[in-house]
């Protein structure tokens, strides 16, 4: 299964791909983390910061990602705050 990429129309419209919308088993790069400062700090403490590469194990519900050999569960609303791009 190929990872979903935003179409040029979506990119032009300003739509951003979030962790909650990623395809299962895709490799993604975090581009931005939005939300309340406490959420951003919590995700940063887990290592989810812009530039980090993740493998999406389960995107829906509580998202499950793999990062550097560790598995991390990220709540549904938090996963919607993590903007990503599909890694080439």
Image (tube, rainbow, N blue to C red):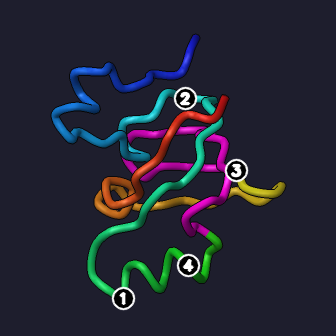
Question: What is the span of residues highlighted in magenta in the rendered image?
Answer: 48-66
- Residue 20's spot in the image, x, y percent? 37, 44
Which residue was labeled with disc 2?
24
Element under disc 2 = loop
Element under disc 1 = helix
Along the horizontal axis of the image, is 38 left or right of 65? left
2 or 4: tag closer to the N-terminus? 2
3 or 4: tag closer to the N-terminus? 4
Q: Would you identify the image quadrant in which residue 78 lies?
A: bottom left
Which residue was labeled with disc 4?
44
Q: Nearer the viewer, mark 3 or mark 4?
A: 4
- Residue 61's spot in the image, x, y percent? 37, 46
1 or 4: tag closer to the N-terminus? 1
Q: Categorize mark 3 by other alpha carbons within 10 Å: few (<14), some (14-19), many (20+).
A: some
Residue 62 counted in the magenta span = yes
Q: Are marks 3 and 2 in contact (CB under 8 Å)?
A: no
Element under disc 3 = strand
Q: Would you identify the image quadrant in which residue 79 lies?
A: bottom left
The disc placed on residue 66 is 3
3 or 2: tag closer to the N-terminus? 2
The residue sitting at 53% across, 22% down in the picture is 3
Q: Categorize mark 2 by other alpha carbons within 10 Å: few (<14), some (14-19), many (20+).
A: some
Q: Nearer the viewer, mark 2 or mark 4?
A: 4
Residue furthest to the top? 1
């Amino acid at each position: 299964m190929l990872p979903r990429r935003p179409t040029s129309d979506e990119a032009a419209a300003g739509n951003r791909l979030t962790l909650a919308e990623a395809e299962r088993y895709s490799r993604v790069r975090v581009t931005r983390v939005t939300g309340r400062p406490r959420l951003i700090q919590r995700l940063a403490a887990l290592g989810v910061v812009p530039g980090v590469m993740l493998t999406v194990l389960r995107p829906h519900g509580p998202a499950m990602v793999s990062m550097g050999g560790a598995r991390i569960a990220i709540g549904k609303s938090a996963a919607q705050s993590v903007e990503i791009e599909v890694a080439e």
